[in-house]
Image (cartoon, helix red, strand yellow):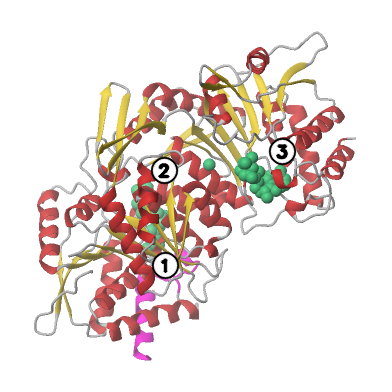
């Protein structure tokens, strides 16, 4: 029951949050590609940042981006930096997901044809609860040197994410849904998540269903990743498994993703890395951002554009002539983007 | 720091918990190899079949006494009896001896091909608190809170041990893995204590890494971690250590050490494998590698090096591998192959 946005005068307005680190560069790539393909999308760009910049109050820009997303319902977003300092603010990334209640994170982990990694035939989809669990932000120091951090699991949100996973699996002709948990240790919290999953699964008899403890799943993921299809899990395990998954098929520069709620959808690279270390060097791989954008186009019903652009990306990667550094190549973000633009002309 | 003393024969006495299932067979293999290498060890076999005392699971007084006296034990797999109100024996041992740190090295095994052939990682996991505090409750119907507990005391203890361990194995680089961007106070405390402890070890390099990045980089290229000792809170340690085991082909080949205030217990990570028990088929490598960690802990590095080399050479040669590694050798044949390299 995810909503469909409305368009005005044949065009869509979409919020664009480039994010910190490599965000500006990979967003530039998407903008150029959309322009050449005459995609009927107008960007409403907001440069929120998690870095301390001084000029504009970051809080103001954050509010502005939330309001823009509330208006437009659809957004494309890079990753915002989160400082580690204890007195620092909460992660904007998490705050945004909680504020818009975009509760389901979807991360697609799939081998790219023509790009060989240590594992082949990996094709899994990680569905991650985005709004509670270990990311609740509820912590306190009872006495000096003793800190408690609360992990919250609710029946309502467990049920909602389980339903999402099963309908996603059904809609995308997937066969199996695996619930990842640590219910042998967190008997109540993960126990509730797991029990709810199995209850909801009864409404989907056509799907194969199982569950697995998170440490075992991590071990299986690096030895036999082909066994996984759709996976559903609480917040923290999602972070772990999407990063393991990304590494299996070629890294964070390749993995697209989306955060979905009942009313809003924000597309963002699936394994959420800022990339401060390579910022401004024209070196980032824009694939994750471009494929997130094509997922967005499908969501908007602009399938022709989505198909042409994603096909061009896959073909450039399969040709293997133009590749960014993370894929073992020497080409810049601009070279790679240009190769896609050329490829699109032939499609 | 190992507190044991040599006995009248010039040997150390070590408690041996042989365990269930394949336990006795793989234990025999270890004993034979130690004898062939003339390691200065005498074994004292202890039975830990659980008993219920005042409604609580404990292990026999005898076994506790033995470990307390020897300060060190080697342990095979234990099958946890289901039902009857028993908590896991491993947990009982951990509590009885306050085993606060779990050390899990993972190294590619030369005779066993996986997509990763260059793994050499060492991970230390805080073993007593964190997400495993067991404090949970249902606030209202359908809303559950689970408390992750991080204390200065437990964190400092495991971190200090981590730095000492890094020095002892000559990997002078500690990296603390955390998620302090999200869990600012709890993981933040762990990280800030680490920074303080690091000041006492100026010859050990220290840095931190987000859990996400560790998972990403380890699975991309484990070589990046060859000179690093990772230290992390309980749950992350559990998950990442199993992930590392996956890189080298599973739990069947990974040793581990449980370090306590006074006593330490070294054990294979795998289970009791009832399906192949008593058939001379089991692979004793994990228990053997655990016993190598034990020798190092006792300061018997010479013996550890000598025996490890014989094990690795036998595996690399690939002529006497057990069934789980795709070979046809029995436990006895594999053991004898190692022994022949020691002579
Ligand atoms: N799109 C991309 N293309 C190429 N490399 C990428 C991309 N995104 C992330 N990376 C790389 O993945 C690694 C992890 O990224 P991450 O964003 O976590 O780094 P960081 O933010 O600089 O460090 P930290 O997370 O510790 O603050 C980095 O080496 C980064 O360069
Ligand atoms: N040392 C070993 N050598 C050969 N095979 C092993 C070894 N350890 C485990 N296995 C195999 O791995 C599989 C799982 O073993 P594991 O011991 O975990 O069994 P289990 O039934 O879980 O036992 P437990 O209840 O004690 O945990 C079994 O098929 C077993 O034969
Ligand atoms: Mg485990
Ligand atoms: Mg088992």
Disc 3 to disc 2: CB gap under 8 Å = no
Report the magenta residues as a range.
A323-347
Quarter of the image for residue A223 reads bottom right
Quarter of the image for residue B113 reads bottom right
* Chain ID at mark 2: B
Residue denoted by label 1? A205
Q: Which mark is residue B209?
A: 2
User: Image height check: is B168 above or below A58?
Assistant: above
Q: Nearer the viewer, residue A275 or B133?
A: B133
> Quick check: which quadrant has ligand 2?
top right
Spatial distance from mark 1 to mark 2, Cα to Cα? 42 Å
Q: Which mark is residue B21?
A: 3
By secondary structure, the bulk of the magenta-drawn segment is best described as: helix
Lower position in the chain sequence, tag 3 or tag 2: 3
Using the rendered image of the protein, determine whether residue B320 is visible from the camera's viewpoint. yes
Residue A82: percent from the left, percent from the top?
27, 47
Helix, strand, or loop for circle 1?
A: loop
User: Image height check: is A147 above or below A68?
Assistant: above
Classify mark 1: residues with Cα within 10 Å, few (<14), some (14-19) or many (20+): few
Q: Identify the residue at image location x=65%, y=57%.
A: B114
Disc 3 to disc 1: CB gap under 8 Å = no
Mark 2 lies within 8 Å of ligand 1 (Cβ measured): yes
Q: Is residue A325 magenta?
A: yes
* Chain ID at mark 1: A
């Amino acid at each position: 029951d995810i909503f469909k946005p409305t368009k005005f005068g044949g065009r869509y307005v979409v919020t664009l949050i480039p994010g910190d680190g490599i965000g500006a560069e990979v967003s530039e790539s998407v903008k150029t590609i959309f322009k050449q393909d005459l995609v009927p999308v107008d960007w409403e760009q907001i440069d929120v940042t998690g870095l301390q910049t001084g000029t504009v109050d970051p809080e103001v820009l954050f509010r502005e981006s939330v309001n823009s997303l509330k208006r437009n319902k659809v957004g494309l977003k890079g990753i915002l930096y989160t400082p580690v300092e204890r007195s620092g603010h909460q992660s904007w990334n998490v705050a945004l997901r909680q504020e818009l209640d975009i509760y389901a994170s979807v991360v697609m982990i799939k081998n790219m044809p023509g790009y060989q990694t240590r594992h082949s035939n990996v094709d899994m989809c990680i569905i991650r609860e985005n709004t509670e669990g270990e990311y609740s932000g509820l912590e306190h120091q009872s006495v000096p040197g003793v800190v408690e951090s609360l992990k919250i699991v609710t029946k309502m949100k467990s049920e909602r994410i389980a339903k999402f996973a099963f309908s996603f699996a059904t809609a995308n002709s997937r066969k199996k849904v695996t619930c990842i948990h640590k219910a042998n240790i967190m008997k109540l919290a993960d126990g509730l998540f797991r029990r709810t999953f199995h209850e909801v699964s009864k409404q989907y008899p056509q799907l194969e269903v199982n569950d697995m403890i998170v440490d075992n799943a991590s071990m299986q993921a690096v030895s036999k990743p082909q066994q996984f299809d759709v996976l559903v899990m609480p917040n923290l395990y999602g972070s772990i498994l999407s990063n393991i998954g990304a590494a299996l098929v070629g890294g964070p520069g390749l993995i697209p993703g989306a955060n979905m709620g009942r009313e809003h959808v924000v597309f963002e690279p699936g394994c959420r890395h800022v990339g401060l270390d390579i910022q401004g060097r024209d070196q980032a791989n824009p694939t994750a951002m471009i494929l997130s954008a094509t997922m967005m186009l499908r969501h908007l019903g602009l399938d022709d554009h989505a198909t042409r652009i994603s096909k061009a990306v896959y073909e450039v990667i399969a040709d293997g002539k133009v590749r960014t550094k993370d894929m073992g190549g020497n080409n810049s973000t601009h070279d790679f983007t240009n190769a896609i633009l050329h490829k699109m002309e032939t499609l | 720091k190992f507190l044991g003393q040599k006995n009248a024969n010039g040997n150390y006495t070590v408690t041996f918990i042989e365990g269930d299932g394949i336990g006795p067979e793989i234990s025999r293999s270890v004993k034979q190899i130690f004898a062939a290498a003339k390691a200065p060890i005498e074994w004292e076999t202890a039975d830990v079949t659980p008993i219920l005392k005042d409604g609580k699971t404990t292990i026999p007084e005898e076994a506790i006494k033995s470990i307390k006296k020897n300060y060190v034990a080697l342990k095979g797999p234990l099958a946890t009896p289901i039902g009857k109100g028993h908590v896991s024996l491993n947990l009982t041992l951990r509590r009885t001896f306050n085993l606060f740190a779990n050390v899990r090295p993972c190294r590619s095994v030369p005779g066993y091909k996986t997509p990763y052939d260059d793994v050499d990682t060492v991970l230390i996991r805080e073993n007593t608190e964190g997400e495993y505090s067991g404090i949970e409750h249902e606030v209202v119907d359908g809303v559950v809170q689970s408390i992750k507990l991080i204390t200065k005391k437990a964190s400092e203890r495991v971190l200090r041990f981590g730095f000492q361990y890094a020095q002892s194995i000559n990997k002078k680089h500690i990296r603390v893995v955390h998620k302090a961007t999200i869990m600012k106070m709890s993981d933040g405390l762990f990280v800030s204590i680490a920074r303080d402890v690091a000041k006492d070890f100026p010859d050990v390099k220290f840095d931190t890494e987000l859990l996400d990045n560790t998972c990403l980089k380890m699975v991309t290229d484990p070589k990046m971690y060859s000179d690093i000792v990772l230290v992390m809170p309980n749950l992350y340690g559990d998950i990442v250590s199993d992930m590392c085991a996956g890189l080298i082909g599973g739990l069947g080949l990974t040793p581990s050490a449980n370090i306590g205030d006074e006593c330490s217990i070294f054990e294979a990570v795998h289970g009791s494998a009832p399906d192949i028990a008593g058939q001379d088929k089991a692979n004793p490598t994990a228990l053997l590698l655990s016993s190598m960690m034990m020798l190092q802990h006792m300061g018997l590095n010479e013996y550890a090096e000598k025996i490890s080399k014989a094990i690795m050479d036998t595996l690399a040669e690939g002529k006497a591998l057990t069934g789980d590694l795709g070979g046809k050798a029995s436990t006895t044949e594999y053991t004898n192959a190692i022994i022949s390299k020691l002579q």
